[in-house]
Amino acid sequence: MNTKPHGRPNLRPGYSRLGSRWSLSLWRVLLGGVLLGLAGCHIPGWSDTRLAKNAAETIFRHSHAGQFDSVYLTAAPEFKEQTPPQALAALMAAFDQQLGSYQGHELVNTSLRSQMGGAASSTQVVLTYRVTRERGVLATTMVFRIAPAQGGKNRQALLEQYEARDAPGDTSAAPGPGKKRST
């Protein structure tokens, strides 16, 4: 093997001790992808959004089964202070009376609101659904606060606000366009 004046081996152009230029580029791309993948596992808000979506699915399931007490249990203390369980049950029962039975729902929008402040830091997840009923369509917005669960090890999504209004552009028999029903 020939050596250059500085003592390094004379390799063919385009090659190094580790392989070709192409294989070095491939290794860099793979390493970058692995690092990005690992970083993506801890994206702030991703797990919060997942918690809120699971809580919303639970609320849909219980409310359409008429289990309004179970829906009330997922609410934040501030929600419970402002809304007695009977008022929430009456609101959800009114949807069935006025708009007919539940047909399905589709997630339309998700957003995060974060407030930083040391121990008082909090995250809110806002989910907007298009809820189809027998005689109308509702735009339903649920706001969840992500908080430590009892015991402090896990986190939970607590319902802070529930709002339903006629969906924009819906021309069904839903009562009064833009009429807002919220709690």
Image: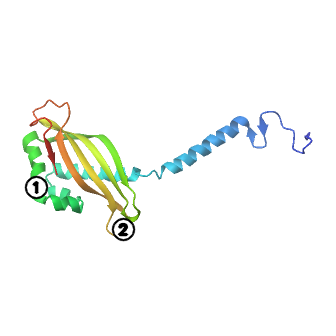
Q: Position of residue 73 (x, y in %)?
A: 21, 61
Q: CA distance from mark 1 to mark 2?
A: 31 Å
Q: Is residue 119 left or right of residue 8?
A: left
**In this rendering, position of residue 143 left or right of residue 132:** right
* Quadrant housing the N terminus: top right
Q: Which secondary structure lies at badge 2?
A: loop
Q: Residue at x 79, y 43 (%)?
A: 17
The residue at which mark 1 appears reads as 87
Looking at the rendered structure, which numbered label has been put on residue 128?
Answer: none
Write the residue at 30% across / 48% down: 126
Residue 106 in the image: state x and y as whole percent: 26, 39
Q: Is residue 13 above or below residue 77?
A: above
Residue identifier under label 2: 152
Kindly state the secondary structure of the residue where label 1 is placed.
helix
Q: Which residue sits at x=10%, y=58%?
A: 86
Q: Residue at x 45, y 50 (%)?
A: 43
Disc 2 residue type (three-letter): Gly
Q: Dividing the picture into quarters, in which one does residue 164 lie? A: top left
Query: Residue 142 versus residue 32: which sits nearer the camera?
Result: 142
Q: Is residue 82 above or below residue 33?
A: below
Whole-percent x, y for residue 180 in the image: 15, 43
